[in-house]
Image: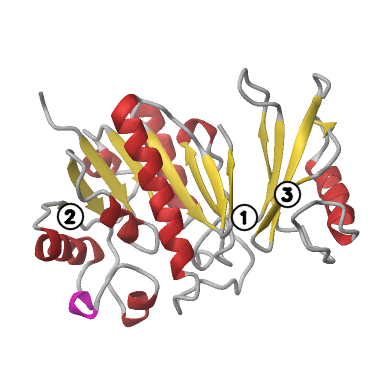
Amino acid sequence: MQQNQARLNITINGQNGDFPDPVAFALSDTEIKRIAAEAIRTGYVPSIDPVAADLAYFVVDRFPATREMPARLMLRPKTPFGEPQR
Amino acid sequence: MTQRTVTIIGAGALGSHLLLFCRNWDVALRVVDFDRVEAKNTASQFHSAMGMGKNKAKALQSAMQGLFKRKIAALTSKLTDDNQSELLGGSDLVIDCTDNFAARQCIQDYCSSAEIPCLHGALSAEGDLARVVWSEHFVADQEGQPGQATCEDGQNLPFHGLAASLIAQIAQQYLADGTKQSWQLTPFAMVRLT
């Protein structure tokens, strides 16, 4: 993996897997969601069942590389448990 | 040596179960929640029919005393910008088990300014993802879309237990040797974040 690249990890429907190819760390959230949606739809992500995924409410956490771990982009559902505040 | 204080804020799906796994820690435990136990809570939280109608923190105080003879402090105020110091101050560790953006932001801001280590636990509405993340890496999500599931029927109860166990494991490791790890959890997979 090159210095400006990251591993893209995807969580959807309680399943989790890594997108097989490295991606640019600087990709926008919109671009990441586009890549992920296509990969999920076509079954390209190991451990995630193919599905037409609506990722509009998903978020991307960005973790730069450390000595222990490579750079990672974590695409996941939001985690607000409970009803939206009124 | 003075006993350390651990504050758990939020005594719902995560916080109530977390308390079970902290019961043998050699720390002073403090639980904060302003809400009351409703019948629906008994399906998805560690609250029983005996606690119904009581404040959640008080109900857990009674339950922990009755079941395990474990003393905990119960604080029953709602967290605001004006009482952060009263509810969270003096803690050696704060564990955020709240369920909304405003509270998480308030906790994160206070702990950052007071230099109190803070571990956040967060569940997705569908019960298919939990995040357990130290404050320096945590980004509180804005609320989800209207009409989301809230799992009040207890369908995701085993996953709540897994998530609460993970919070306890990470906090216990921190208390033992200062190690800070962040993880995310799905029902059948764990991924280390930091």
Q: Which residue is mark 3?
A: A17
Q: CA distance from mark 3 to mark 2?
A: 41 Å
Find the magenta span and give its range: B49-53
The residue that label 2 is drawn on is B74
Q: Is residue B154 left or right of residue B3?
A: right
In this rendering, the answer to whether B86 lies above or below B76 is above
The amino acid on which the numbered mark 2 sits, given as a three-letter code, is Ala
The N terminus of chain B - image quarter: top left
Report the front residue among A27 and B144.
Answer: A27
Closer to the camera in the image, B172 or B140: B172
Residue displayed at 27% across by 57% down? B20
Secondary structure mostly seen in the magenta stretch: helix
Which residue carries the number 1 mark? A78
Q: Please tell me in which quadrant of the rendered image residue A32 appears.
A: top right
Chain letter behind tag 3: A
Spatial separation of the CA atoms under disc 2 and disc 1: 30 Å
Residue A6 shown in magenta: no
> Which is in the foreground here, disc 3 or disc 2?
3
Element on which disc 2 rests: strand
- Subunit bearing disc 2: B
**In the image, B166: left or right of B94?**
right
